[in-house]
Amino acid sequence: MDTNILNKESYMDHAATTYVDPKVKEAMDPYFCDNYGNPGSFHGRGLPVRESIAEARAKIAKYLNADSSEIIFTGSGTESINLAIKGVAFRKGKGHIITQKTEHHAVLHTCEYLEKKGFEVTYLPVDDFGMVNPEDVKNAIKEDTILVTIMYANNEVGTIQPIAEIGAICKENNVLFHTDACQAAGALDLDVKKLNTDMLTINGSKIYGPKGVGLLYLKKGVRIDALIHGGGQESNMRAGTENVPGIVGLAKALELAQENRAAENARLIKLRDRLITSIMDEVKDTKLNGHPTQRLPNNANISFLGIEGEAMLLLLSEYGIYCSTGSACTSRTLDPSHVLVGMNMPYELAHGSLRFTLGKRTTDADIDYLLKTLLPIIAWLRTLSPIKVKMNEIMKRKPVSYRERFA
């Protein structure tokens, strides 16, 4: 491999987090040292800051086609999701919740927690592309169903769900509908009326905004219980002094994302498709994960037969290429990503996935550098792999965990 490329760097992990856009930072800066008043204070330092929060709330509401009073600021996307799901559950006291197997862990672990508290949860299957069938949602609704929560777009494979159709089904059956839009906020339409959603969650760090801030859209008339108690901030739904720089930054980030969405999506799709096509053409025994067309414009998740994703990830990192593996291995488990397993993927492929998520600074030169670096790495790792089966044989197998395989 050409050693001259070792001083290069390419960040392709924008689904994990993004840098703060300079225009966002510029909007936030005055609220650290100059406009530092508490928005709850009724004096010359506090009132202007309160007005800045109101302006940010109104700006966000505009892009969601919502009312300002329907926007609740939180500390993260995860907190927003917890507020939505637990808020409904605690208000109702009991009942049935519907979600699906490839949700973010913020949803899945919250639902698992509620199961321990006596709630019933249905985890719907997805197809091989990671898509939920709206008819499955309809068929799962029961008399005591209190909430359906389905993500807008998947964080690992980029599949975009038919949210508007699912939301319409929920509305017809008088069931509340929540969608996690954290990955979708920078690329997709957020009109909550078109999406037929009662609750929608967003965070700042996925759209070139600050970390540590998120929001929950809560449709007027929907009643949920608060999780954090204290002051009366955020209409009594989220106590604690507001993160003013974060809120201002989130509003600016969403403005930039939505205003430039069409042009940026077109640019990213061109780069993404070139990346996918080049890898699939040049490397045998590969599989594109997620829906081929109904996917986020910046997401390319590809599995490489017979190779551990972590090995590719670490070697690419040595060359300054930062991406992600679809495997969710931790010190406690060797099982592959729950998303890929949920999509009926055999373990030999599920363990060999890489997720490349492109961003504002990604260029054709980054794609060139990735291809020049990745292809020799794959060839070398495959010479070391003990897996010698063919792709058509692998795809006939059902998913199986390492525990099951080596039990």
Image (cartoon, rainbow, N blue to C red):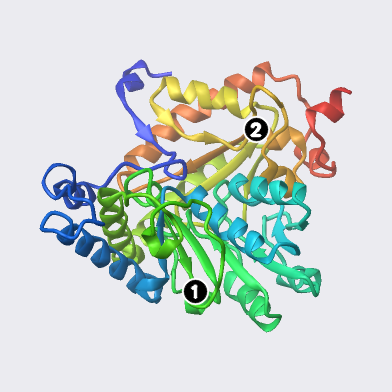
Residue 219: mark in rendering: 1
Q: Quadrant of the N terminus?
A: top left
| Whether residue 93 is visible | yes
Residue furthest out toward the bottom: 172
Question: In the displayed structure, would residue 307 be above or below residue 186?
Answer: above
Residue at left offset 66%, top offset 76%: 170
Question: In the displayed structure, would residue 118 be above or below residue 258?
Answer: above
Q: Which amino acid, mark 2?
A: Gly
Question: In the displayed structure, would residue 83 be above or below residue 29?
Answer: below
Q: Quadrant of the C terminus?
A: top right
Q: Position of residue 44 (x, y in %)?
A: 10, 58
Answer with mark 2 or mark 1, whichever residue precedes in sequence: 1
Image quadrant assignment for residue 318: top left
Numbered disc in front, either 2 or 1: 1
Residue marked by disc 2: 352
Question: In the displayed structure, would residue 407 be above or below residue 236?
Answer: above
Nearer to us in this view, 330 or 91 = 91
